[in-house]
Amino acid sequence: MASESEVSGSSRAKSADAAQLPGHFTVPAPTRLAIPASDWQALVATRANAVVIGHEDAALRVWTAVWPTLQKPIYWVEADRLSLPRQPAGTLILQGAHTLTASAQQQVFDWLDRDAHATRVLTTTPQALFPLVEGGTFLEALYYRLNMLLLIL
């Protein structure tokens, strides 16, 4: 599996203007963010889990733009005050994944394991998670569960 730096290097060349949802509306990419068209399309038109690496304000612009496309209910959870919904469903936005403790990482993984396809997880972090996996401070299984789509802002 490619590291985050390997994945991002080839895909930052062009930015997306909008993604068309089949039978729905066009969702424009946030302005001033260089998001490759294929990545924007995947974020908007699929239910793939995603990790967004970048400044919190940039990630917020991404979530605001995709909000109408997200499956409801939507749960917004801060990693340092982890409180997961009782049942996996809809969309979980996990802010600050890099701050999850080892026990919180296991808790998120176990929660997702109940029904892996019931909840889409969109994760924000200001730093790459893969070096944390390599250093043994981030649960590898959780990393690969969250990192189906990687956007570096």
Image: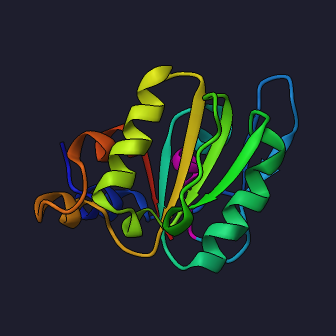
Who's the residue at 51% across and 71% down the image?
153
Q: In the rendered view, would you say 149 is above or below 111?
A: below
Q: Residue furthest left?
A: 135
Residues in magenta, as a range: 34-40
Specify the quadrant of the image occupied by residue 12: bottom left
Q: Please indicate whether residue 41 sits to the left or right of residue 151 in the image.
A: right
The picture places residue 67, in percent across and down from the top left corner, at 79, 50
Q: In the rendered view, would you say 147 is above or below 15?
A: above
Who's the residue at 43% across and 43% down the image?
108
Q: Nearer the viewer, residue 136 or 31?
A: 136
Q: Nearer the viewer, residue 24 or 98?
A: 98
Residue 43 visible to an observer of this rendering: yes
Q: Please indicate whether residue 147 sits to the left or right of residue 3 in the image.
A: right
Who's the residue at 87% across and 30% down the image?
24
Who's the residue at 24% across and 49% down the image?
139
Q: In the rendered view, would you say 142 is above or below 82?
A: above
The picture places residue 79, in percent across and down from the top left corner, at 50, 63
